[in-house]
Amino acid sequence: MIRTVLLCLPLLAVPFPARAEAKAEPIDFYFVDSGTAPGPAVLWLAVQSTAHYSCANYRLPVTAKVSGQTISVQIGPVAKPDGGLCATAMGPARGEAAVGKLPAGSYRLQITQGRAVDSYTLTIGEETTALAPQQGRFSTSSSQIVYRVAEQAAHVSCVFGLDARCRGRAQAGAPTCESFFSDPALAELKPLPARPGPYSQSWFNSDGRRYAAPAFSALRPIVLADRYRDPERCLVLTVHAGGGESVSNLR
């Protein structure tokens, strides 16, 4: 008779490694307010990673929703470029989202990335949109105050080509940015004082000049005048108005 002896060994519980929580991507963000003062803000949000990636067109998915006095922003993980085409230069991952139209007041801005949550207070006033951090773990803002554009104010940007063909035209007396801004018709317009911060998405150009109302109606015929029309695109003039109107000498 063969006796079978079963040896019972204690089961060894070997835990699987805990799934590490994805670390929040450090990001920087800013708002653009394209609304006119006085009036509601029209906000657009731009976000970018502080780290640089091997492709300059990596994406940072961003969504924004407004519920009452709370603005909720959700940031997803960094994604590779659409279509798999990699821009040759290195750069941060970028994303953007429309927040929408908001009346003046105080709002709670909540930015969520994974399980990390940062919070800010966003105050929309008649002339400025101001941001105050409350709790920050992974985010910073490159613009604490955004100055709002006055209704019917206008901004003129001018770019003159630097290639040999354009330099030759300049030597022959063709209009340049310097000659445009010295036009006597512009001297009659009231300039707006320079203020820090962006006015709207199209007002970042530091080489331009800002004029007070009713500058747009006066600038439009100047920009479109025959002497400034330039089909060869050496001289590029653009006028942006606070109400969203724009005109260029290339049209």
Image (spheres, grey):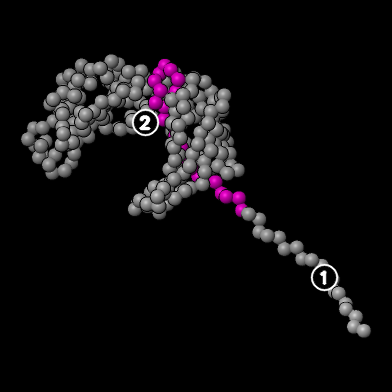
**Is 236 left, or right, of 110 in this rendering?**
left
> Which residue lies most toward the right here?
1
The picture places residue 168, in percent across and down from the top left corner, at: 9, 40
**Magenta stretch bounds:** 20-41
Write the residue at 48% across / 23% down.
Answer: 102
Q: Where is 161 relative to 187, above or below? A: below
Q: Residues within 10 Å of mark 2 (few under 14, many from 20)?
A: few
* Residue 9, numbered label: 1
Write the residue at 50% across / 36% down.
Answer: 63
Q: Residues within 10 Å of mark 1 (few under 14, many from 20)?
A: few
Q: Earlier in the sequence, mark 1 or mark 2?
A: 1
The picture places residue 129, in percent across and down from the top left corner, at: 45, 25
Label 2 is placed on what type of residue? Gln
The picture places residue 166, in percent across and down from the top left corner, at: 14, 39
**Is 18 left, or right, of 52 in this rendering?**
right
Write the residue at 45% across / 32% down.
Answer: 98
Q: Could you tell me which secondary element the residue under label 1 belongs to? A: loop
Q: Could you tell me which secondary element the residue under label 2 belongs to? A: helix
Name the quarter where the C terminus is drawn. top left
> Which residue lies most toward the bottom here?
1
The residue nearer to you, when weighing 244 against 5, is 5
> Which residue lies most toward the front here?
1
**Mark 1–mark 2 distance (CA, rounded to whole Å):** 70 Å
Q: Where is 94 relative to 210, above or below? A: below
Write the residue at 55% across / 42% down.
Answer: 113
**Is 12 left, or right, of 56 in this rendering?**
right
Label 1 is placed on what type of residue? Leu
Name the quarter where the N terminus is drawn. bottom right
**Is 107 left, or right, of 171 in this rendering?**
right
Kindly identify which residue carries mark 2: 201
The picture places residue 228, in percent across and down from the top left corner, at: 15, 28
